[in-house]
Image: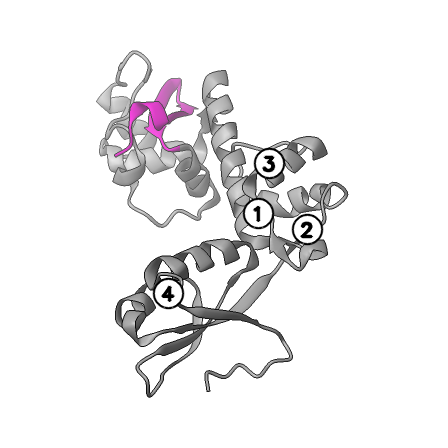
């Protein structure tokens, strides 16, 4: 379950009765779109159906039977969300908008590069400042993924930016190969790997270009700065030999 502070109210009015449930806002939107695949117990603040959630009042059981054909809250809650409306206060909307804005900044920073600076990643602070300058409005009720394209369109006149992936080859010396490769291989899409005769490990990984600094930090952390890396261009033959 989630905390009451993180929940919003979904409300359905039917047959002269009002039914309210407390649910995670993102999960509520997924349920309304028919995209929710998790367990309902994990995204609600109370395994209960209310007439007035703020007061804790519950509707009569015969009203539940009449409208939903059951009194089981776990069966009723998704239906209230699907058929009803999501209610949020001004404070909840402000907090959700701020959280969604941070998610949008992080998503763009992880995937975007500056084509005028040899495809260097944009720091999150630069992305956040550019979003503000471009007047990008973040919808707290929509998934981040559905807002990225519009945000990029508005960002391009403000900063040079594009989404890209990068392919990096890394060679880890034998002294660190055993433990380091286990961490490095999880960072992105491991396209190829090979253990060398001297005990060193070579891997070729692909990941969002904006995550290059995170990747190099990870490699240095687990190899004490002794690893070798190079970006593999489209023209290069991706080989570990």
Residue under circle 4? 184
Q: Which residue is drawn at 44% across and 33% down?
A: 83
Q: In the rendering, at what x and y percent does residue 11 appear?
A: 41, 24
Q: In the rendering, at what x and y percent does residue 33 appear?
A: 48, 44
The relative height of residue 206 versus residue 216 in the rendered view (above or below) is below
User: Secondary structure beneath disc 3?
Assistant: helix
The dot on residue 161 is 2
User: Secondary structure beneath disc 4?
Assistant: helix
Q: In the rendering, at what x and y percent does residue 131 appear?
A: 65, 36
User: Secondary structure beneath disc 2?
Assistant: loop
* Number of the front mark, 3 or 4: 4
Q: Which residue is drawn at 25% across and 34% down?
A: 1
Residues at discs 2 and 1 in contact (Cβ within 8 Å): yes
Q: Give the mark nearest the N terminus, 4 or 2.
A: 2
The answer to whether residue 89 shows anywhere in this view is no
Q: Is residue 121 left or right of residue 17?
A: right
The span shown in magenta is 1-24
Residue under circle 1? 108
The relative height of residue 165 versus residue 148 in the rendered view (above or below) is below
Q: Which residue is drawn at 33% across and 69% down?
A: 181
* Number of the front mark, 1 or 4: 4
Residue under circle 3? 128
Residues at discs 3 and 1 in contact (Cβ within 8 Å): no
Q: Foreground: 12 or 151?
A: 151
Q: Give the mark nearest the N terminus, 1 or 4.
A: 1
């Amino acid at each position: 379950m989630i905390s009451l502070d993180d929940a919003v109210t979904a409300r359905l009015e039917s047959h002269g009765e009002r039914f309210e449930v407390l649910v995670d806002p993102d999960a509520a939107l997924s349920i309304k779109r028919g995209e929710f695949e998790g367990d309902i117990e994990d995204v609600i603040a109370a395994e209960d159906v209310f007439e007035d959630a703020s007061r804790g009042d519950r509707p009569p059981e015969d009203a539940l039977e009449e409208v939903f054909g059951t009194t089981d809250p776990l069966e009723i809650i998704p239906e209230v969300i699907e058929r009803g409306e999501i209610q949020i206060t001004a404070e909840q909307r402000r907090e959700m908008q701020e959280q969604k804005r941070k998610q949008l900044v992080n998503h763009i920073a992880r995937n975007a590069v500056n084509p005028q600076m040899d495809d260097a990643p944009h720091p999150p602070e630069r992305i956040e400042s550019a979003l503000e300058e471009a007047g990008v409005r973040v919808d707290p009720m929509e998934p981040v993924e559905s807002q990225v394209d519009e945000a990029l369109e508005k960002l391009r006149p403000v900063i040079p930016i594009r989404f890209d992936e990068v392919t990096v080859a890394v060679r880890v010396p034998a002294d660190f190969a055993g433990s380091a490769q286990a961490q490095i291989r999880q960072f992105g899409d491991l396209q190829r790997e090979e253990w060398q005769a001297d005990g060193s490990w070579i891997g070729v990984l692909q990941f969002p270009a904006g995550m290059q600094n995170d990747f190099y930090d990870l490699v240095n952390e687990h190899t004490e700065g002794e690893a070798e890396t190079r970006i593999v261009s489209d023209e290069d033959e991706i080989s570990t030999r």
